[in-house]
Image (cartoon, rainbow, N blue to C red):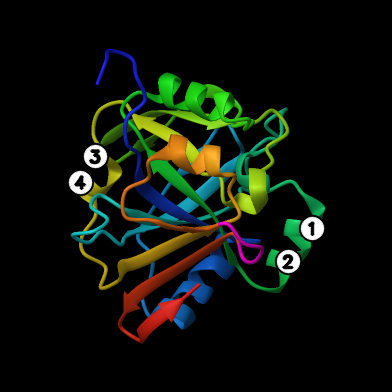
Amino acid sequence: MKAGAAGETAVDHLVAAAATLAQGVAWCEATLGVTPGPGGQHALMGTHNRLFKIGSAAFPETYFEIIAIDPDAPAPGRARWFGLDEPALQACIAQQPRLVHMVARCSALQAQRQALVDAGCLPGEVVAAGRDTPQGRLQWLITVRDDGRLEHGGALPTLIEWQGVHPTAAMPASGVTLRALTLRGLPDAAWSALRLRGVDHLPLPGAALRATLATPLGEVTL
């Protein structure tokens, strides 16, 4: 691969949006049979999260994120990521949390972003972000649109490039593993540009994401 060229991407984490973290934790316990581990605050976006590991041989270094607007954080002065400010999503998650998105890991984010732009997508600009943890600071680069919206109903992944340690390095096994993931409705050019390992794609209308997980409660599809 030539220097600076976009390479393969991999599933980094699944994102479930919740109205509150307490609601998200209760949903996770009832739906997946596990209590999510600790997360932290994102000062840049006024959000906070809880996390747990779902990695498997097919999806290494993969985790599940439950994210919500942090009521104790000041307004970020911009649209939050993952569409969290959109009234339609807020109305939906007021009823219960839902899987909304997938973040794809890459090692050449700028080149991968440009490949998506060349494919006719609007992935957003590259933003530097981070948060403190008991094990040290996590830092990453991530694509975020100025309006915070998710393209193609959330099927177009957000891109992330970690700057140093990956968060799963400090996560214990959770008892949940990702078995399969399907994206639906991406343009062919975007799907080809992603070169996303282990993920299926259907060019048909329907739910943008479908994740199958092995859990203590049995196989669960979100």
- Where does label 1 land, which residue? 88
Task: Give the Cα separation between the discs numbered 3 and 1.
Answer: 37 Å
Residues at discs 2 and 1 in contact (Cβ within 8 Å): yes
The residue under label 2 is: 92
Q: Amino acid at mark 3?
A: Gln
Measured in 3D between alpha carbons, the distance from the residue under mark 3 to the one under mark 4, in whole angstroms, is: 10 Å
Residue 185, percent across and down? Answer: 61, 54
State which tag comes first along the sequence, 3 or 4: 3
Q: Is residue 76 left or right of residue 41?
A: right
Question: How far apart in space, not on screen, are marks 4 and 1 (Cα)?
Answer: 35 Å
Q: Position of residue 20 (x, y in %)?
A: 62, 61
> Height in image: 55 above or below 106?
below
Residue bearing the label numbered 4: 169
**From mark 4 to mark 2, how far is it between C-alphas?**
33 Å
How far apart are labels 3 and 2 at the CA level? 35 Å
Q: Which residues are magenta?
A: 203-207
Q: Secondary structure at mark 1?
A: helix
- Residue 103, visible in the rendered structure: yes
Name the residue: 71% across, 73% down.
95
In reply to whether residue 13 is colored magenta, the answer given is: no
Q: Answer few, some or many: residues within 10 Å of disc 1's Cα (few below 14, many 20 plus, some between 14 and 19).
A: few
Q: Earlier in the sequence, mark 3 or mark 1?
A: 1
Name the residue nearer the viewer: 149 or 173.
149
